Image: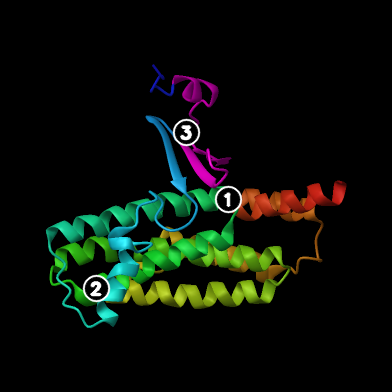
Amino acid sequence: MRSKHIDHLLNDWPFEPDGSVRLVKGADGRDLIQVRIDLGLLQLEVSGRPDGMKPEGFPSILDWLMHRELESQEIELDDDLCNEVDREFVQFYHRRMAWLRLQKFDLAVRDANHTLALMDFCREHSEDEEWTFQHEQHRAFVLFHRIQASALIAIENQEVEQAVELIDDGLEEIRESFDDLGWEEYYETDELVVRLGELRESLQKDSPTAKSLQQQLEEAVQSEQYELAAILRDQMSRREC
């Protein structure tokens, strides 16, 4: 009888507090993401729904809901459907975080866009203000990930001015989300806003060619811009090859 436990996988891949993520191949050769958590292991599909399910034959709940809207079908976000929407929010959160850790920034942007579009749909169609608020309070967090990933893509392509523009535009989106929630007074001191401001300042202060990669790396680590530091390390490694 084939064993169903995964002891060997967990023993060979110890949990680390800051999280561990890897890309693996499935039995059919397809790409998969695995995330090591303290209680075990998550395995996610790299496209469509992270759980691989196709709600009503569509790639995601969002796709199905948008199809129904396009067909002018009545949309009632009852408890069962709200639960399915919440599942999709959580699944895309896990995969977005995984893409960021893997430095697959374009895919992090893709999944952030999906989540934001799902938030938009729920805000437009839900009559439950409390349920809608449960999502909207996290909009700035999702925006932060999209802004950060988009800026890092620009930095990788040595398009620093574009990265600054993306941060500026993104900060305005976050400000609007705070205004919508009546949180205007918290915007300037919000941790996510401060972090984006520090990244923008570091980009505006010096052009990529003004300092050595080592100097830029040291400053990125000191300011806790770890995603930028990872990109700089990769650039240094490629130069040494």
Query: Is residue 194 inside the magenta stretch?
Result: no
Query: Element at badge 3?
Result: loop
Q: Which residue is mark 2?
A: 123
Q: Residue at x 49, y 25 (%)?
A: 9
Q: Is residue 217 above or below residue 118?
A: above
Is residue 216 or residue 28 the one in the foreground? 28
Q: Which residue is mark 3?
A: 17
- Identify which amino acid the numbered label 3 is placed on: Pro
What is the CA distance from the residue labelled 2 to the residue labelled 1? 34 Å
Q: Which residue is mark 1?
A: 224
Give the residue furthest to the top. Answer: 1
Residue 208's label in the rendered image is none
Figure disc tally:
3
Query: Element at badge 2?
Result: helix
**Of the residues tagged 2 and 1, which is closer to the observer?**
2
Query: Is residue 17 inside the magenta stretch?
Result: yes
What is the CA distance from the residue labelled 2 to the residue labelled 3? 35 Å
Q: Residue 138, located in which quarter of the rendered image? A: bottom left
Q: Which residues are magenta?
A: 7-35
Is residue 17 or residue 44 the one in the foreground? 44
Ranked by sequence position, the earlier of labels 2 and 3 is: 3
Q: Residue at x 34, y 69 (%)?
A: 63
Task: Give residue 213's position: percent from left, percent from top.
Answer: 79, 55
Do the residues bearing badges 3 and 1 touch, measured as CB atoms within 8 Å? no
